[in-house]
Image (cartoon, rainbow, N blue to C red):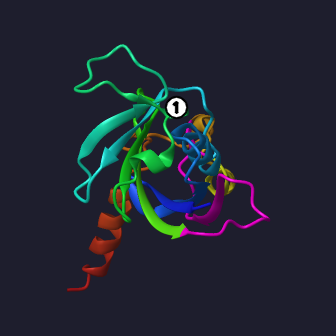
């Protein structure tokens, strides 16, 4: 049984990607779920794949369900469409769009075809992870801990402004510029 290996790039940063291995007989719904799991996204939103070419132009649509919109051609349904039926070349590309409000886009490229499956793996599965995945709903992971440390170190909490720190341009009577002028004048007294 052929195992297809797809590289799934996040559109905004192609150094962030996941390699998904999947049987050629499995469906686009299986690939959809594997992508969401590998990027730690939930499965609460609409999604669609587009067949694509080397220029990343959108072709035939493979949707989670038929949505209430106009299609150029009737869409294929993910759960009913085996991946092998849409592979026309060894470097086949797809565009994956998730959550039609936030418009997460992923570029998918077939990078390898194995004739033998690995008996230790359950397909589909993520076989390589590169880069920190974007957070679906805000910050997460390393960003959270680093941000919390920076907030603590520099006291960046919102109420820090009320505890003695003023807004830029506040006239607090200290007049830092006046002291500089006085120092400059003292140095010039003897000349």
Is residue 188 left or right of 113 when viewed as pictured?
Answer: left
Viewer-closest of 84 and 95? 84
Is residue 44 left or right of 73 when viewed as pictured?
Answer: right
Snapshot quadrant of residue 69: top left
Seen from this angle, which residue lies furthest front?
1
The residue at 34%/55% (across/down) is 88
Seen from this angle, which residue lies furthest right?
120
**128 in the magenta segment:** yes
Measuring from the top left, give residue 101's x and y in whole percent.
41, 26
| Highlighted range, magenta | 114-139
Q: Give above or below for 30 relative to 79.
A: below
User: Of helix, strand and loop, which mostly describes the magenta segment?
Assistant: loop
Q: What element carries label 1?
A: helix
Viewer-closest of 160 and 13? 13
The residue at 53%/62% (across/down) is 5
Measuring from the top left, give residue 105's x and y in whole percent.
40, 44
The residue at 35%/71% (across/down) is 183
Q: How many labels does the image show?
A: 1
Measuring from the top left, give residue 21's x and y in whole percent.
60, 59
Q: In this figure, which residue is indicated by the disc labeled 1?
A: 80
Mark 1 burial class by Cα count in 10 Å: few <14, some 14-19, many 20+: few
Snapshot quadrant of residue 131: bottom right
Seen from this angle, which residue lies furthest top?
68
Is residue 77 left or right of 137 when viewed as pictured?
Answer: left
Measuring from the top left, give residue 132's x and y in whole percent.
57, 59
Q: In which quarter of the image is the C terminus?
A: bottom left
**101 in the magenta segment:** no
Q: Quadrant of the N terminus?
A: bottom right
The residue at 58%/36% (across/down) is 158
């Amino acid at each position: 049984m052929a195992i297809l290996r797809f590289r799934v790039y996040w559109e905004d940063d192609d150094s962030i990607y996941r390699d998904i291995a999947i049987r050629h007989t499995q469906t686009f719904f299986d690939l959809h779920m594997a992508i969401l799991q590998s990027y730690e996204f939930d499965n609460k939103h609409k999604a669609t794949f587009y067949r694509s070419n080397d220029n990343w132009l959108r072709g035939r649509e493979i949707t989670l369900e038929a949505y209430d919109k106009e299609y150029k051609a009737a869409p294929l349904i993910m759960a009913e469409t085996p991946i092998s039926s849409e592979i026309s070349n060894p470097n086949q590309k797809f565009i994956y769009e998730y959550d039609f409000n936030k418009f997460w886009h992923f570029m998918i490229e077939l990078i390898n075809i194995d004739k033998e499956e690995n008996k230790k793996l359950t397909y589909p599965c993520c076989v390589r992870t590169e880069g920190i995945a974007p957070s679906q709903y805000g910050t997460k992971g390393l960003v959270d801990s680093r941000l919390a440390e920076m907030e603590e170190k520099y006291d960046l909490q919102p109420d820090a402004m009320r505890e003695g720190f003023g807004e830029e341009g506040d006239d607090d009577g200290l007049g830092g510029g006046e002291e500089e002028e006085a120092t400059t004048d003292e140095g010039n007294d003897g000349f």
